[in-house]
């Protein structure tokens, strides 16, 4: 895994939507980011090919699809451990329970609360 100083994103299932335009703009802005997209199955990731292509075309985006049916739930530890998140801004976006789980793990790992942002995607 390459070490990227910058931002780390955890979109969960439908939470990918806000990150698509961001992924397209990274190269133009020079910002660097690591994107872990957690889904149940590969079929739930319709934008995966597009994100892989963007990541291959630029050193600004590192992308990893995380199908939980194959790899288990995405955790801070299996995403590389606390050192991957040191000094980075972290954004978590997805259903409340999954988002809360990642946020709790980040807190336990020592991530600064000022660097962790989240968006709730709960269907009602």
Image (spheres, rainbow, N blue to C red):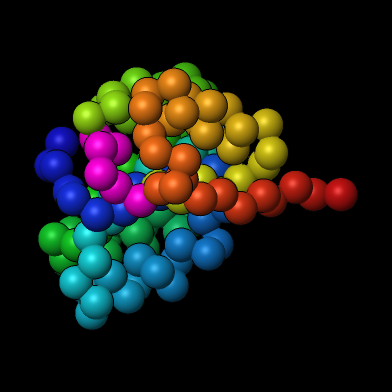
Does residue 61 lie above or below 65 as drawn? below
Image-quadrant location for residue 86: top left
Residue at coordinates 31% horizontally, 53% vertically from top-left? 7
Whether residue 26 is visible: yes
How many marks are shown on the rendered structure? 0
Question: Is residue 40 rendered magenta in the image?
Answer: no
x and y, in percent, of residue 124 in the image? 86, 49
User: Foreground residue, 115 or 40?
Assistant: 115
Residue at coordinates 28% horizontally, 70% vertically from top-left? 26
Lateral position of residue 112 relative to residue 85, left or right: right
Extent of the magenta region: 84-89
User: Foreground residue, 19 or 46?
Assistant: 19
User: Foreground residue, 42 or 14?
Assistant: 14
Residue at coordinates 61% horizontally, 46% vertically from top-left? 94
Does residue 88 lie above or below 40 as drawn? below
Quarter of the image that includes the N terminus: top left
x and y, in percent, of residue 10 in the image? 45, 44
Lateral position of residue 6 relative to residue 90, left or right: left
x and y, in percent, of residue 108 in the image? 44, 21
Whether residue 13 is visible: no
Lateral position of residue 111 relative to residue 58, left or right: right
x and y, in percent, of residue 77 in the image? 34, 21
């Amino acid at each position: 895994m390459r070490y990227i100083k910058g931002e780390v994103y955890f979109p969960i299932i439908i939470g990918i939507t806000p990150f698509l335009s961001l992924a397209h703009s990274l190269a133009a802005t020079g910002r660097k980011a690591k994107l872990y997209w957690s889904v149940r199955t590969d079929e739930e990731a319709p934008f995966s090919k597009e994100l892989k292509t963007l990541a291959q075309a630029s050193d600004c985006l590192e992308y990893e699809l995380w199908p939980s049916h194959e790899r288990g739930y995405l955790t801070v530890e299996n995403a590389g451990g606390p050192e991957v998140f040191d000094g980075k801004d972290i954004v978590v976006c997805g259903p409340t329970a999954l988002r809360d789980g990642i946020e709790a793990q980040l807190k336990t790992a020592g991530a600064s609360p000022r660097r962790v942002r989240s968006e709730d995607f709960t269907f009602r």
